Image (cartoon, grey):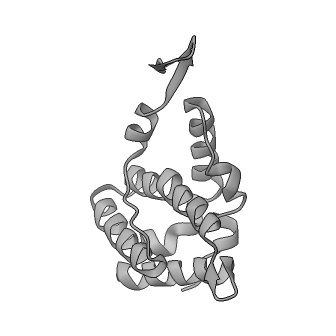
Amino acid sequence: MAFNISKIFESYEPFSRITTKKEYEERMNTFLTERYAYLIELTEATDTAAASNAFCDGVHEEFKKFGKVRTGELMDLNCFLIYYIFPAILKNEGERAAAICDTLKDTWNSRFKCDINYTNYESLMGGFKKKLLGIMVEEEDK
């Protein structure tokens, strides 16, 4: 099982730094149309644990420097996973989505010694705020 990690995480740094609802929506659409298909080995796997291990091993191999992934880089990768990969799986995989995300989350946390969780696209979209005269207000839906 070989994931195209470089394509999935292509330009992950700017994707991990989003500031507006519109920007997130555009980048999620880009991820879904250009990169989601590269997760097919994970989303259609009969052994989700093995697929999650292969995915995490691929990420480690792609981004390691001197045997490990640097902390700053790992933070961006964590954000990318939380902002794009988990919500995309939850949006597209129906009943299996939670099981896939749980397995991937547990494998990721164990592999990279971190403690991330996941959420869906709607929750992320609902969390954006904007400033009006220096005061944080909820961003209106358009």
Q: Is residue 40 above or below residue 133?
A: below
Q: At 57% from the left edge and 51% from the top edge, which residue is drawn?
A: 32
Q: Is residue 136 above or below residue 121?
A: above
Which of 105 and 49 lies nearest the eye of the viewer?
A: 105
- For the N terminus, which image quadrant? bottom right
Query: Residue 62: x percent and y percent?
Result: 67, 79
Which of 45 and 20 lies nearest the eye of the viewer?
A: 20
**Residue found farthest to the top:** 133
Query: Residue 119: x percent and y percent?
Result: 37, 50
- The answer to which quarter of the image holds residue 22 is top right
- Left or right: residue 106 versus residue 85 is left
Query: Residue 42: x percent and y percent?
Result: 46, 73
Query: Residue 74: x percent and y percent?
Result: 58, 67
Q: At 48% from the left edge and 31% from the top edge, which residue is drawn?
A: 128
Q: At 56% from the left edge and 37% from the top edge, which residue is drawn?
A: 25
Q: At 50% from the left edge and 58% from the top edge, which residue is drawn?
A: 85
**Residue found farthest to the front:** 134
- The answer to which quarter of the image holds residue 7 is bottom right
Which of 7 and 109 lies nearest the eye of the viewer?
A: 109
